Image (cartoon, grey):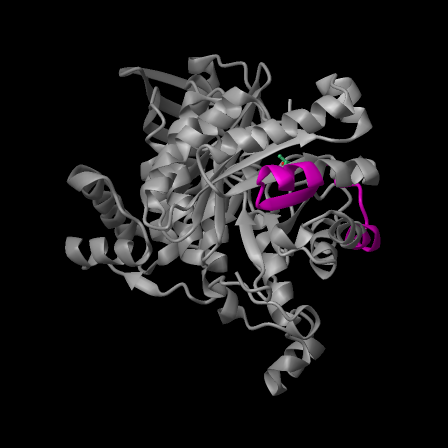
Amino acid sequence: MKNKQLIIFDTTLRDGEQSPGAAMTKEEKIRIARQLEKLGVNIIEAGFAAASPGDFDAIYSVAGVIKNSTVCSLARASENDVRRAGEAIQPAMQHAQKNGRIHTFIATSKIHMENKLRMTPDQVVERAVQAVKWALEYTDDVEFSAEDAVRSDMDFLVRVFDAVIQAGATTINVPDTVGYSIPALWGERMQQLIARVPDSDKVIWSTHCHNDLGMAVANSLAAVMGGARQVECTINGLGERAGNASLEEIVMAVKTRRDVFNLETRIDTTQIVPTSKMVSSITGYPVQPNKAIVGANAFAHESGIHQDGVLKHRETYEIMRAEDVGWNANKLTLGKLSGRNAFRSRLGELGITLDGEEALNTVFARFKDLADKKSEIFDEDLQALVSDEFVSNTPELFKLVYLQVCSQTGEIPHAIVTITESGSEKRAEADGGGPVDASFKAIESIVNSGAELQLYSVNNITSGTDAQGEVTVRLSKGGRIVNGQGADTDIVIASVKAYLNALNRLYSKMERAHPQI
Ligand code: KIV
Ligand code: ZN
């Protein structure tokens, strides 16, 4: 890899998945992984193999289908974790490029070593070296991370990194696990580590920053200026707590300010917005309208002075072009009269492959249904339809059969709902503060889940009043948090679909261990 290359390591499927309720199924991970490959990321961290048999299976499947990006599994520095990671990336090791990586880590700060690991510094060094050696039994591509590097003693970091490089690690990652650093200090820390660690020129230096103080991107870029050549980041900045550095911001900063960074990535930036939308719809994490690059307003000029300037000369107020990051790429796709073949081929162009003719028939029927309600069908509509299809990979314990809502000025909103529970039909009705509230209360009177509604949000998928509304519902119960999504041109129906989807997830078994505990 030339030194002018900045490696983009995407951890949406691992650190991103650690966001509350963002746990993904295998099929969802495969879909996102295919899109990340299309986007051109160098490395896809597909999960944490030891977390659960489901996560192992997801990494194994992603490793089987992805050829143009390296597929990586996270592993704590324990023999079981590393061996599970090694087994999970095996399909990638069968490809000609042997594109499988193991990413092992152990905490190096005093506070973590004493209170969490209850290990001495000597034991930590020994374990880190051993973990790298176990990993090398499976692949030559081994990354080591010093968790909580931000609060670790510099001399100790130098010692650990020296030891793991001598053991054979090829990438050294310096994480700001708790989002504590500030750019000037983080850049300096990277620079000093590279200067002090023996053989530092034999490895790639990487950074992984969390956003607790809103500086993950700034800190990552400072590390790049300090010599890092890999950045770990996520789509839409998803991730543990306040999230990770956002991939789209890192990539566009490096591209737009090439005069400062003088680095290249291999990202196809026109795939940024489609990837953002896919991740948002699968995880149920909406993108705030004023979010840089991928927010709905990122390229909207509201003030008259700005609009006038942009019309006269675009660069007066625009430093990037919307189309370069994939805005406006939403082609008018298909209409009411489009046939099955045109439909299948457009899905193919969008990188969507459905499992078998039956799945295609179901989605095609939904498409025809939608085309009856909405004259123009865009790529985003198709993505939502397919999301729906994949959503139904969650066992459908509860299914919507019928919904009637009455919402009238001066009257209390009322809903009548019929759903199936494990195949048998149940009907209920309820009043509520609005039609959505009434519908949810009616469903709850059947299901009695006792779950707490943590989030309810509606986004329009495309523009216009006939657009599909995409609803996200977050439920929590007994420490478990799930997100459900539903899309429809009728937002009350979309809401009910989302609520039932969340309940289906709540009642399905998707347990995972947390890697950093
Ligand atoms: O934040 C962190 O330290 C991590 C490591 C596992 C890299 O996610
Ligand atoms: Zn992290």
Q: Is residue 449 left or right of residue 164?
A: left
Can you name the residue that lies furthest to the bottom here?
Answer: 312
Q: Position of residue 347 (x, y in %)?
A: 28, 53
Q: Quadrant of the C terminus?
A: top right
Quarter occupied by residue 513: top right
449 relative to 205, above or below? above
Q: Is residue 285 left or right of residue 355?
A: right
Residue that appears at 56% across and 67% down: 264
Q: Position of residue 474 (x, y in %)?
A: 54, 30
Can residue 300 be seen at all in this image of the molecule?
no
Quarter occupied by residue 335: bottom left
92 relative to 372, above or below? above
Q: Position of residue 368 (x, y in %)?
A: 23, 49
Q: Nearer the viewer, residue 230 or 123?
A: 123
Count up the numbered dots.
0
Q: Which residues are magenta?
A: 162-188
Q: Nearer the viewer, residue 183 or 114?
A: 114
Residue that appears at 41% across and 19% down: 508
Q: Determine if the magenta segment contains residue 181.
A: yes
Q: Is residue 172 left or right of residue 55?
A: right
320 relative to 171, above or below? below
Q: Nearer the viewer, residue 135 or 247?
A: 135
Q: Position of residue 164 (x, y in %)?
A: 64, 37
